[in-house]
Image: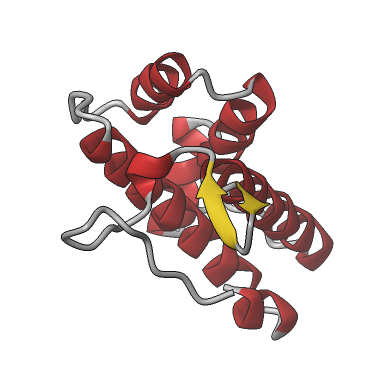
Amino acid sequence: MRDAYIGGNWLGTILLSIAAADGLTKYTAKRYGLRHRGDYVRRVTDIEKALQLPASAAAALRRVWATPKERHGYMHLNEDVPQDRAVLERAARDRCLGLHEAERELFAYRPRQGAIVPKYPQLWPTDAQGKTSGFL
């Protein structure tokens, strides 16, 4: 996504951000045993409540998703999709940063005696001994 943004592929960045946010919320809901609702906004609300997710991270996920009209406009390349490169760049940047903010919160960790302690451990894959491997 970073490469798409840096390369000036604003529409690609927007669409990748939307798809990644959708996948992230589905993954989070599954890992926490929440229902996979078809409604993204409800899924974010369920995650926010279940994980006691900060309002700023939930708001960031909602910003990435935007309004149905806007989102479908980008997905289907409707006539009302902005053509102005500056507008597209701003939309791409906002979604990319929103996704980053949400990921930074959901995969937050703190160091402890040479190890990492995830804030939301169920989101991190574990081995048979319950340990998480990570590449930092």
Q: Is residue 95 above or below residue 62?
A: below
Most foreground residue, 39 or 9: 39
List x then y, in percent, for residue 11. 58, 66
33 relative position to 19: left or right: left
* Image quadrant where one finds the C terminus: bottom right
- The quarter of the displayed image where residue 132 is located: bottom left
Confirm whether residue 78 shows in the render.
Answer: no
How many labels, in total?
0
Confirm whether residue 126 shows in the render.
Answer: yes
Residue that appears at 47% across and 34% down: 69
92 relative position to 87: left or right: left
Most foreground residue, 59 or 117: 117
Q: Is residue 73 above or below residue 38?
A: below
Residue that appears at 40% across and 24% down: 47
Q: Is residue 106 above or below residue 2?
A: above
List x then y, in percent, for residue 119. 53, 39
List x then y, in percent, for residue 81. 58, 52
* Image quadrant where one finds the N terminus: bottom right
Most foreground residue, 106 or 20: 106
Residue that appears at 70% across and 86% down: 7
Work out which residue is located at the far right of the displayed protein and give it.
86
- The quarter of the displayed image where residue 13 is located: bottom right
Residue that appears at 50% across and 39% down: 65
List x then y, in percent, for residue 39. 29, 26
Work out which residue is located at the far front of the displayed protein and give it.
113
